[in-house]
Image (spheres, helix red, strand yellow):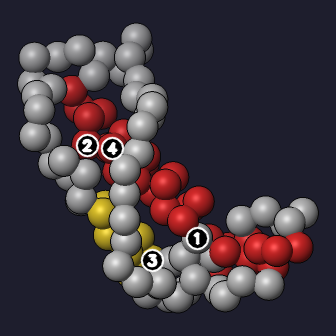
Amino acid sequence: MKPTLRAGLAHELRFRVPLSKTVPALYAEAAEFGLMPRVFATGYLVGLLEWACMRAVHAHLDELRELTLGTHIAVSHRAATPPGLRWWCRPG
């Protein structure tokens, strides 16, 4: 790890929600998900947060020997996001 990796590091990732990242698309084998509204799925939201964190720390890691790995998440979101709208997250 490089000395530039410090607490308080921030990064923003913007993402336009496609139909493929909505609740009905989460687990095709789960009929229950198929009955849900077409809004950005929390399961995909967790992946988006992980992606933003990876981007935030990438420049501060030895990319040949180090990587990120999530072990805990505490998150909330304010409203459902339908496809076509932009979503953003700011880990840090």
- As measured in the structure, the alpha-carbon distance from the residue carrying label 1 to the one carrying label 2 is 23 Å
Residue at the spot of label 3:
16
Q: Amino acid at mark 2?
A: Ala
User: The N terminus is located in which quarter?
Assistant: top left
Specify few, some or many for label 1: CA neighbours under 10 Å numbering under 14, 14-19, or 20 or more: many
Cα gap from disc 4 to disc 1, whole angstroms: 19 Å
Pointer 4 or 1: first along the chain: 1
* Mark toward the start of the polypeptide (1 vs 2): 1
Q: Residue at x 37, y 65 (%)?
A: 76
Quarter of the rendering containing residue 61: top left
Q: CA distance from mark 3 to mark 4?
A: 18 Å
The residue pinned by badge 2 equals 56
The nearer-to-camera label among 1 and 2 is 1
> In the image, 39: left or right of 33?
left
Q: Position of residue 92 (x, y in %)?
A: 19, 47
Residue pointed to by mark 4: 53
Residue type marked 3: Arg
